[in-house]
Image (spheres, grey):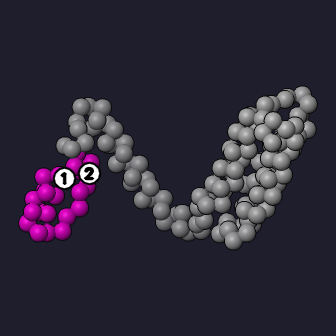
Amino acid sequence: MWNSRYYPRLLLVVVILAVPLSFIGSSVPLISAVLLHALTVVGLVALVLLRRKFTFSNLSYTLIFLFICLHILGARYFFVVATHKQLEELLPIAEQVQLKERRLLEGMSKGVSLLEMLNFEEHCAAIRGGKASKLEFRV
């Protein structure tokens, strides 16, 4: 089968079946799923239309197939569904994380170790004393 001239067609049929099947039971809204796969479909159509101008080995077709399968899997399982309100609530937290990261990078660029930027000693003392404590960066 690997050396068959029909091998690329078989891969194409599998992908054509996999895209709509990936919609079943997905938490991604249908319109979003369609938009996610629109460029995949355009790429596949281009690959078919240009197959005589640009010929690929079966290994290349296999790698393209694997990439598209990973894209389909990623679009199904790694899509973040959040409301506008939820994103607005999370934005200030993300900005604080970004600020701390910038401060950590500045400290490291000046030769300060990550351990020195932690509350490590206080944390260990609290744990030894049986108190609740969180290991945190002091930046």
**Considering only vertical position in the picture, is 41 above or below 79?**
above
Q: Are marks 2 and 1 in contact (CB under 8 Å)?
A: yes
**Considering only vertical position in the picture, is 36 above or below 106?**
below
**Residue at image x 28%, y 35%?**
108
Q: Position of residue 78 (x, y in %)?
A: 59, 58
Classify mark 2: helix, strand or loop.
Answer: loop
Q: CA distance from mark 2 to mark 1?
A: 6 Å
For residue 16: magenta? no
Quadrant housing residue 82: bottom right
Q: Position of residue 22 (x, y in %)?
A: 72, 62
Q: Amino acid at mark 2?
A: Phe
In the picture of the structure, the residue carrying the numbered disc 1 is 119
Classify mark 1: helix, strand or loop.
Answer: loop
**Residue at image x 9%, y 63%?**
128
**Residue at image x 26%, y 51%?**
137
Q: Position of residue 131 (x, y in %)?
A: 13, 69
Q: Nearer the viewer, residue 39 or 4?
A: 4
**On-image quarter of the N terminus:** top right
In the picture of the structure, the residue carrying the numbered disc 2 is 137
Q: Amino acid at mark 1?
A: Asn
Q: Nearer the viewer, residue 18 or 114?
A: 18
Work out which residue is located at the far bottom of the displayed protein and give it: 25
Q: Nearer the viewer, residue 56 or 91?
A: 56
The segment highlighted magenta reads 117-139
Q: Position of residue 45 (x, y in %)?
A: 87, 44
Does residue 137 appear in the picture of this structure? Answer: yes
> Does residue 17 appear left or right of residue 128 in this picture?
right
Quadrant housing residue 36: bottom right
